[in-house]
Image (spheres, rainbow, N blue to C red):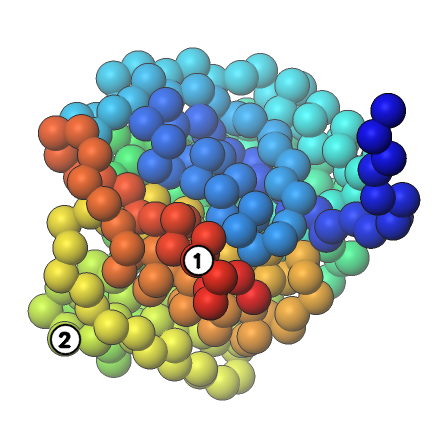
């Protein structure tokens, strides 16, 4: 028998509460890849299975809410959760179950475990990932529990009614979103396609921090939002402050988009492979 290293070294953990993307670009597959390359052990509470490729979401099956809650409870009570994030939540019933299970597991703002709420409302092809009841449940039950809320500009409009068309309006949106309860808001600027840069905005209710980055000319951006939210979550699991983790996530997603690749007939995925080269393995 070969001896194994007897060091008791372990890894921080991060939990993703998310849907499966059969194309492997977004959803829990993307989150687990990001966690791994950030040296964080990934835990998963699956919410739904999507039948998906680069042409769209063709079908889906949502899991029973008690199975979603059960996964959160199972990992929290045994393995411990260093930080958690949400992706596709599928329905108001699942959101209610997630809110309750997170409360029991001490996940949320002002609780022990930082909680990133990525308010994923539609797939990149425009297929809704929850309906109006889901939106209300997200606003009422999860936003007040979020340590960081990470909307893109479509999600800003759904949550606040504000149509953001420039950087100045991003400030107004951040203030409106902060009033809905999260500790921090990180408004993503990816959809401001006319802007030559991609400057995201972090707001804590008092001050704004700009997160600058390049606007990269690639059609392959599937999973960019998930990569940003999961890198932020991994940073928090590793003990970073929210502003530090937000800067780390911006660096991570800029590289992920810069190294994106074609796959299938339409929009290809952002990359995690760049993190495997030795100079990027910090
Ligand atoms: O990128 C958001 C997202 C999250 N989760 C699942 C998805 C998508 C987008 O397509 O399919 C399962």
As drawn, is 63 to the left or to the right of 261? right
Label 1 to label 2: alpha-carbon separation: 29 Å
Q: Nearer the viewer, residue 149 or 4?
A: 4
Q: Do we see residue 10 in this rendering? A: yes
Quarter of the image where one finds residue 88:
top left
Q: Which mark is residue 139?
A: none
- Answer with mark 1 or mark 2, whichever residue precedes in sequence: 2
Q: Residues within 10 Å of mark 2 (few under 14, many from 20)?
A: few
Are the two marked residues, 1 and 2, in contact with CB atoms closer than 8 angstroms? no
Mark nearest the camera among 1 and 2 is 1
Q: Image point 10% across, 69% down: which residue?
A: 194
Is ligand 1 closer than 8 angstroms to the Cβ of mark 1? no
Q: Image point 66% across, 19% down: which residue?
A: 66
Q: Nearer the viewer, residue 105 or 20?
A: 20
Quarter in which the N terminus is drawn? top right
Q: Nearer the viewer, residue 229 or 29?
A: 29
Residue 121: x %, y % from top left: 35, 40
Q: Residues within 10 Å of mark 1 (few under 14, many from 20)?
A: few
Identify the secondary structure beneath mark 1. Answer: loop
Counting labels gives 2
Q: Nearer the viewer, residue 173 or 75?
A: 75
Residue 175: x %, y % from top left: 42, 73
Q: Image point 41% across, 49% down: which residue?
A: 272
Q: Image point 29% across, 36% down: which residue?
A: 123
Identify the secondary structure beneath mark 2. Answer: loop
Q: Do we see residue 174 in this rendering? A: no
Look at mark 2 in the image and give the residue it sits on. Answer: 196
Look at mark 1 in the image and give the residue it sits on. Answer: 277
Residue 206: x %, y % from top left: 53, 84
């Amino acid at each position: 028998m070969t001896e194994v290293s007897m060091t008791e070294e372990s890894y921080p953990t991060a939990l993703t509460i998310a849907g499966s993307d059969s194309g492997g670009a977004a959803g829990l597959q993307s989150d687990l890849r990001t966690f791994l390359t950030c040296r964080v052990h990934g835990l998963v509470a699956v919410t739904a299975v999507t039948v998906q490729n680069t042409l769209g979401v063709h079908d889906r099956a949502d899991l029973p809410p008690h199975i979603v809650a059960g996964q959160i409870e199972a990992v929290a009570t045994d393995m411990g959760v260093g930080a958690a994030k949400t992706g596709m939540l599928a329905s108001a019933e699942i959101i209610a179950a997630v809110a309750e299970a997170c409360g029991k597991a001490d996940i949320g703002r002002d609780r022990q475990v930082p909680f990133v709420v990525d308010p994923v409302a539609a797939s990149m092809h425009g297929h809704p990932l929850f309906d109006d009841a889901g939106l209300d449940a997200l606003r009422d039950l999860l936003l007040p529990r979020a340590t960081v809320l990470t909307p893109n500009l479509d999600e800003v409009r759904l949550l606040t009614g504000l149509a953001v068309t420039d950087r100045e309006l991003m400030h107004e949106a951040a203030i409106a979103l902060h009033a809905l309860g999260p500790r921090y808001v990180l408004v993503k600027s990816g959809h401001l396609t006319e802007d030559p840069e991609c400057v995201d905005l972090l707001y804590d209710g008092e001050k704004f921090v700009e997160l600058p980055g390049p606007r990269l000319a690639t059609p392959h951006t599937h999973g960019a939002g998930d990569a940003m939210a999961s890198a932020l979550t991994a940073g928090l699991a590793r003990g970073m402050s929210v502003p530090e983790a937000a800067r780390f996530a911006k660096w991570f997603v800029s590289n992920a988009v810069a190294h994106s690749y074609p796959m299938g007939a339409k929009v290809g995925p952002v990359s995690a492979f760049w993190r495997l080269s030795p100079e990027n393995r910090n």
